[in-house]
Amino acid sequence: MISNRAIAAHLERIAQAIDLADPDSGRSRTYGAAARRIESSKRDFAALAQARELTGVPGIGPSLARTIGEFVSSGSSRRLDELLQQIPPGAWQLLSVRGLGARTVGRIVRDLGVSDLDSLRAAGSDGRLSQLPGIGSRKVAQILAEIERIAATRGLFSLGHALATAHLEAARLGNIDGVSAVRLAGAARRACETMSGVDLVVAVRDPSRPALAALGGESLVQLDPDELQEPIPVRIRVSAEESLGSALVLATGSDEHIARLTDLARRRGIELDSPQTTFGTEAELYRAVGLDLIPPELREGREEIELARRGQLPRLLEHRDLGCDLHAHSDWSDGQDSIAAMAEAAHRAGLRQLVISDHSQSLAVANGLSPERVAAQRDEIAAQARQWGELSLLHGTESEIRVDGSLDFEPEVLASLDWVVASVHAGLGQSRSAMTERILTAISNPATCAIGHPTGRIVLGREGFDFDHDVVFAAAAETGVALEINSQPGRLDLSADLARRAARAGAVLTVNSDAHAAAQLANTQLGAMIARRAGLTCAQVINAWEWEQIAERRARRLAGA
């Protein structure tokens, strides 16, 4: 069944297409508004379309109902197909430039003859772009910088995108007769935050069968045909069942890791890439070359081989160790689901604690809570908490860190909460020294428990803001303020490299979902992968601790101990 999200995405694409084709018409508003209503609705719009009941929904007229019905039945619509004929194909590329909306892009295409990123760069460089109303020299500079960022990341895909594609392809391949196993490999298995494609190893019972041997190779897979994402390369390596361990090791490690492993093997008379070398499991292969089994996330050719040789590999954090989620949102601010729905999902997931940490008052765009709404929310959380047995439902906030480093509520409001995540969402362009001081001031506040998504980066979308990482990590270590690995697929912030540096500075980390819907509580699977890539153990990740330890740590800070 087609989801509300897919229907909304289709309508949003129609809205964009209208603005690209006729930017001054204003006719896109109907589709955009409908998309937002449908995505946030609890009603099943695909079922309504099939029952021909859409026109009974406020705001859905006959034309819109017909478009939705066509999409539900065929995966497309006549309205979008007609619009696509009017738009240069390269115009869609321009929507990837952060800061350019569809209407502005439509005017650029119409008035300047721009058709792709290269011609947009030329229009910015020769001065034509700055002649358009509303686009000054500063905006042009931002656009040109964005084009360079896009060029630098072209052909790269995020970990979240790669894992979703891998899951889709693994399900397809697993249904093929003769396939006994499909395993993730490559950069995604190592939890790299960006990569050039997805690598899978397919174990088959009879590699000599032409149909099974033909599974190997590379193809392009579109995760969601109705979204403006490039297809991602999927590379498949076919292996006999008895060689699955060998194939997985060779298809997972970085070039440096494999080179060092190959050298160790040759010293023992083993040729890893020989068809005659067969290991059914990865552990067997590593044992044969004198090493403990190295977790996939560490196979980068750094110090992992020496640690494995000495038997000193750390016992890395596992997703099941994360007993609490300290950063999740509800429909009190910008979340999609109620507190009850979030609690139910957390209970099903086996969490021991869930902190509802909605946005604070100054973040109006996210429906931030005033002190009065915080008090009212406390009452609802207390009422809900009694219903969930072993799950402790707790009350927190994601407080905005203001430009001067102060938090968004008075001390007595902050002290009344179980947990305070302090985050930067605005004023991202401060100087390095100003941003460093801003974060240090927030860390020094005794109410601050953690710094949320500490760098503000968006994977493949935005560089993090500039601050002195080492100074901030040292301050977090000294005060006991946790630094977040935000598990939203678009954030993964801190990155694995920065999380490793923070831990080596003595700071503790916190892996949270930042869920804005009940289903997003599963985000922490991504965060756990990043933590493992950073080499983190349970002792270094506060979510793996007992709540009593966490609460005592907060109480000591508030008391000034």
Image: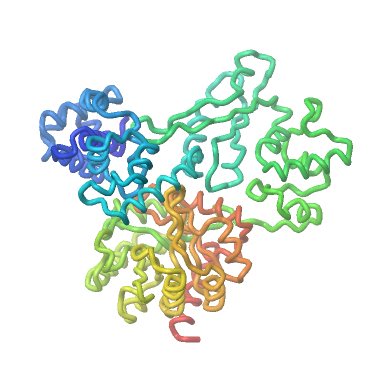
Q: Horizontally, is 481 left or right of 359 in the view?
A: right
Q: Horizontally, is 367 left or right of 212 in the view?
A: left
Q: Horizontally, is 104 left or right of 505 in the view?
A: left
Give percent across and percent down for residue 71: 26, 27
Relative vertical location of residue 255 with respect to residue 200 in this rendering, above or below = below
Give percent across and percent down for residue 250: 70, 36
- Please tell me which residue lies in front, 422 or 316: 422
Farthest front residue in view = 126
Q: Horizontally, is 64 left or right of 115 in the view?
A: left
Q: Residue at x 18, y 43 (%)?
A: 33
- Please tell me which residue lies in front, 560 or 136: 136
The quadrant of the picture occupied by the N terminus is: top left
Q: Residue at x 52, y 72 (%)?
A: 472
The image shows a total of numbered marks equal to 0
Q: Residue at x 30, y 67 (%)?
A: 360
- Please tell me which residue lies in front, 26 or 171: 26
Give percent across and percent down for residue 66: 17, 26
Task: Report whether residue 44 is seen.
Answer: no
Relative vertical location of residue 112 with respect to residue 382 in this rendering, above or below = above
